[in-house]
Image: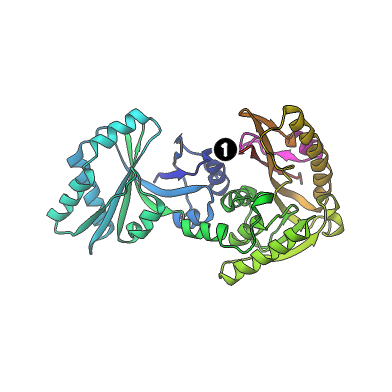
Amino acid sequence: MQTFALLGAHPDLSIAEIGVITKTTPSWKDGQLAIFDDVELELNPLQFRLGGTQKLGVVIGTVTVTEQKSLASFLANDLMTLHPEGKLNFGLSVYGANQSRLDQVRTATKNLGLETKSRLKEAGRGARYVISREATLSAVVVVSNHLLSKGAEYVLIVRDNDIVIGRTVAVQNVDDWANRDFNRPRRNAKQGMLPPKLARIMVNLVGLDGAGKTLLDPFCGSGTVLMEAGLIGFSKTIAGDINEVAISDTEANQDWLKAQNFKTAELRTYIGQAKDVGNHIGARSVDAVVTETYLGRPRKGLETPADINEAVEYLETLYTESFQALKEVLRPGGVVVVAAPVHFINDKPHFVPVNEIMTKLGFTPDPILGDKLVYHHADQYVGRQILRFTLPQ
């Protein structure tokens, strides 16, 4: 059975994350939507693990014409098969990247929910049709109206020549993510913070079963990467930072996570520069390094290209020294996932040559992920380039 995914705001990152975890690539994708032919994992555990996907579901049909009565009968029958007894709650979301085609389908299916409810009533089943102010139902609406436990959310994916009908199986736990982002005791917005969802994506891009494995973040900040690593099963984590406050923040956030009854990893910490990591960690003792490196001085938006080039040159030296040292603590076959800064001036990106640095040091760049994954919002001066490397055996 095919699986559909409603991806996050950075679809390429979301697809890369799904690909590493499921070993699959989409058979179709457009904007924030993707369809996979051979996902073998259960969707609820998969949704919990993913940081960059909003919804997962199964494809239950495809139509070329939006004939409302027959489509309503199809949905009503599916609902009654799914839940043979009790009152039913259901909702509809229509997605598509082709706006004109999307508008046509939304107009054609405007009363589809009411027609489906009528079919259920004729069959003697009570039903509540859940609607939203938006054209699509958010994860919050889906969960708060018990659509996954007492009914269904049906997703119509509008393509150029047909409409895919999906049934949502799992949605992102918005409250859970917000809790870890905003309610943890230590947050330092001035230094910049790695969003938990991006941290989770980066940990997933490692591609390892974390059981019995050790993950290091040598630029740990407030410990976001290490929190997410523990949540998905890494047994041991190590936090390093030159800033003593960062280590204190990491420890406080880890203690808070434990108090919230979340799964955590065993945590070790040290204060020091990444280039001196060998003074704190034994050789060949780490399975993965996942980190957002130092991004450079905070931007004010008035910098010239010359200013950015000077910053990039400084970071080249920092990264060369740091990853030369990190190479010595990684086990053969170990994985590095790094978020490096991308500075934007007039929408033009300025990259730190991380691929070149790592290749000279003996690391192998990931041939599938490449160097095109960038996490960036339009109002930000600095984005993040996400890169993956392995240390040869």
Can you give x and y, in whole percent of width and height, for residue 67 in the image? 20, 36
Q: Quadrant of residue 80?
A: bottom left
Relative to residue 112, is residue 322 drawn left or right?
right
Q: Which residues are magenta?
A: 356-379
The residue tagged 1 is 379
Residue 376 magenta-highlighted: yes
Q: Residue furthest left?
A: 122
Can you give x and y, in whole percent of width and height, for residue 138 in the image? 39, 50
Residue 388 to residue 232: above or below: above
Relative to residue 177, is residue 87 drawn left or right?
left
Relative to residue 143, is residue 333 drawn left or right?
right
Label 1 amino acid?
Asp
Q: Is residue 160 visible?
A: no
Q: Is residue 224 visible?
A: yes
Label 1 SS: loop
Counting other residues with Cα less than 10 Å from the Cα at mark 1, is it few (<14), some (14-19), or many (20 or more)? few
Q: How many marks?
A: 1
